[in-house]
Amino acid sequence: MRDKTQTNSAAPGDRLIRAGAIVFFVGAVATLVTVAPLLLDTTPFPTYMFGLSMLMGAGFLIAGAGVLRSVAAGRRQARGAAR
């Protein structure tokens, strides 16, 4: 019996993983931009730029939630197939 899931269909959690990766990347760029003036001995950026650096952690958490959602959906699907 063939599986009914298309190979190109989006699994639950895929959007969260993609959004988390984008937020993480934005946070990584903000971190590099924030740290560069400290290493180059120029005037540092305003404090809110350090807040933007926290997007790395937020993106990691969002992507992690997407992975957990994907795992939960896979477990539900496996339980349904076993019955």
Image (spheres, rainbow, N blue to C red):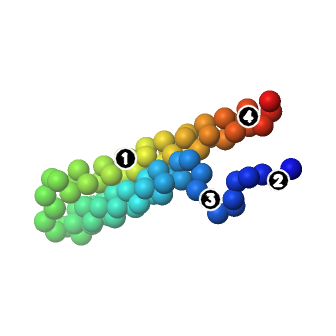
Q: Is residue 28 above or below residue 62?
A: below
Mark 2 residue element:
loop
The residue positioned 23% from the left and 53% from the top of the image is 50
Q: Identify the residue position indicated by label 4 in the image.
A: 80
Mark earlier in primary sequence (2, 4): 2
Which amino acid, mark 4?
A: Gly
Res 28 seen here = no
Q: Report the Cα–Cα distance between label 4 and label 3.
A: 19 Å
Compute the Cα span from label 2 to label 4. 15 Å
Residue placed most toward the observer, 31 or 5: 5
Label 1: few (<14), some (14–19) or many (≥20) C-alpha neighbours in 10 Å: some
- Whether the residues at callouts 4 and 3 have beta carbons within 8 Å, the answer is no
Residue 80 lies, with reference to residue 59, above or below; the image says: above
Residue labelled with disc 1 = 58
* Amino acid on which disc 1 is placed: Ala
Q: Is residue 7 above or below residue 4?
A: below
Q: Residue 23, how many percent across, how many down?
A: 37, 56
Query: Please, what is the three-letter code of the amino acid marked with disc 3?
Result: Ser
Q: Which mark is residue 2?
A: 2
Per the image, label 1 sits on a secondary structure element best described as helix
- Type of the residue with mark 2: Arg
Question: Quick one: label 2, few (<14), some, or many (20+) residues within 10 Å?
Answer: few
Give coordinates of residue 71: x percent, y percent. 62, 40
Residue found at x 58% / y 56%? 10
